[in-house]
Image (spheres, helix red, strand yellow):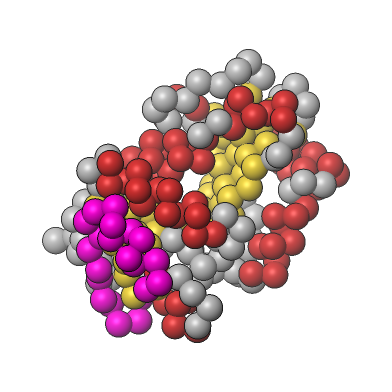
Amino acid sequence: MPIHVGNIEKITNDFIQLSELEFNRVLYDALDSSGTNIVHDVDELIFPPGYRLIRVDNRLDLDDIDEPYFELALLSDETKEVVYYNKVIVISDLVLNCRPASQILVWRTRKPQHRAALNDLAAKIFFHYLIKTYDVVASNISQIIEGTSFWQARMYEALQFGLYVYGYDVTTCELRNILAEDDVSKEQSWLWGNAEYYMDRLAIISRIKLPNK
């Protein structure tokens, strides 16, 4: 399992550009012409009129991504813009015997007119699409903007949903069970920090017990 994918500087630049009108419109046009509407594949999604949730697989030949990847985007057809964007890779781990999905870029507009459509969307995509489709979702060091707060929230929610939550070191293959809310806070200092070894440590949320037998 790769510990991180892509050039972090490029990912940061892409994150910033998504807020720029010209870049966003070009991306809207590209996704609009090639995307598949998946709104009915995600439980509990109800959008105001004029929005579409689309998926596009392997749209670009990216030098910094060797694994299969796809893009998820919420398009506003009224304003012709991308208001939510998520780039996801599907990775392999022989020790855990699974292929987790890993989000490397999650962005949403801050424009207030789209607030209703975006309400709780990131969590619904996470649990009702990624977990449902791939069983396992792993954190990624390249998902640098949402940071640890996004994952802390998902870990607490996962425990409420009865899912499996782990901390995983891809170098030593140490797999730490996170069984209760108190464990989430206790494991923060193990999962995240500035030292180089933290790049090998991932949070994992899974529908199946790991390692998968």
Relative placement, left or right, of 131 versus 57 is left
Q: In the rendering, at what x and y percent does residue 118 appear?
A: 59, 32
Judge by depth and name the residue closer to the eye, 179 or 97.
179
In the rendered structure, does residue 94 fall within the stretch colored magenta?
Answer: no
Asked if residue 210 shows in the view, the reply is yes
Indicate left or right for 98 with 142 as reference.
left
Inspect this view and state whether residue 97 appears. Answer: no
Judge whether 1 appears above or below 26 on screen: below
> Is residue 187 one of those drawn in magenta?
yes
Q: Position of residue 49 (x, y in %)?
A: 63, 15
Quarter of the image containing the N terminus? bottom left
Residue that appears at 26% across and 76% down:
174
Residue drawn at (77%, 46%), measured in percent from left and top?
19
Residue closest to the eye, 134 or 60 = 134
Task: Give the residue drawn at x 44%, y 36%.
Answer: 124
Left or right: residue 7 versus residue 70 is right
Residue 97 pos. (x, y %): 24, 64
- In this view, the residue farthest toward the left is 213
Identify the magenta region: 170-190
Percent coordinates x, y for residue 208 in the rendering: 21, 51
Work out whether 171 lies above or below 3: below
Locate the C terminus and report the quarter of the image it occupies.
bottom left
**Residue found at the far top of this picture:** 49
For image coordinates 61% across by 58% down, the residue present is 145
In which quarter of the view is residue 142 placed? bottom right
Give the image quarter of residue 160: top left
How many numbered circles are shown? 0
